[in-house]
Amino acid sequence: MHSERGLQTPRKNNSREKLPKVSGRYRQYSRPVCVGGPDVSSSPHLYADADFQVIGEAEQIMVHFIAAWERGERKGVFIGEKFKIDVTLSPMPRYDLIKFDHYLFELVGRD
């Protein structure tokens, strides 16, 4: 592990290695798998087994994802335009709701 400004971050992204196992667990209970984030956005082909892919900033495309879900769609790829999000319009995360002692690593900072 390395630390930047007190944040613990793994050196290697294990998400893509874990996806088949995690997806299998959810599908066993008829639950769809939705993936997003930096690794999905930069290498979407590695996550093609997911039911939904969110590529780019979720703030821009969540309305489309929700509309598709409400129409009964259970697969899809949602792509946001790069570098067009004004993050100042996003609400502040509710870090007070997170039980940090339940996690091995903190991937977000807190005061």
Image (cartoon, rainbow, N blue to C red):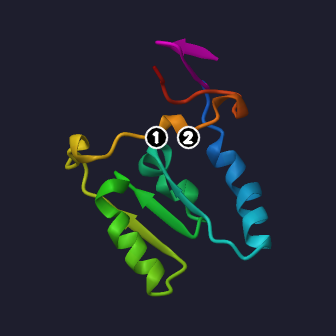
- Between the C-alphas of marks 2 and 1, the distance is 6 Å
Q: Can I make out residue 1 in this image? A: yes
Q: Position of residue 111 (x, y in %)?
A: 45, 19
Q: Secondary structure at mark 2?
A: helix
Q: Position of residue 106 (x, y in %)?
A: 59, 27
Above or below for 23 versus 96: below
Above or below for 80 versus 67: above
Q: As rendered, which of 88 and 98 lies closer to the eye?
A: 98
Q: Position of residue 28 (x, y in %)?
A: 80, 72
Q: Extreme bottom residue here? A: 71
Q: Position of residue 36 (x, y in %)?
A: 49, 53
- Which stretch appears magenta? 1-10
Q: Secondary structure at mark 1?
A: loop
Q: Which residue is mark 1?
A: 94
Question: Is label 2 in contact with label 1 (beta carbons under 8 Å)?
Answer: yes
Magenta span contains residue 28: no
Residue 9 circle label: none
Q: Quadrant of the N terminus?
A: top right
Q: Is residue 39 left or right of residue 87?
A: right
Above or below for 37 versus 53: above
Q: Can I make out residue 56 in this image? A: no
Q: Residue at x 48, y 24 (%)?
A: 109
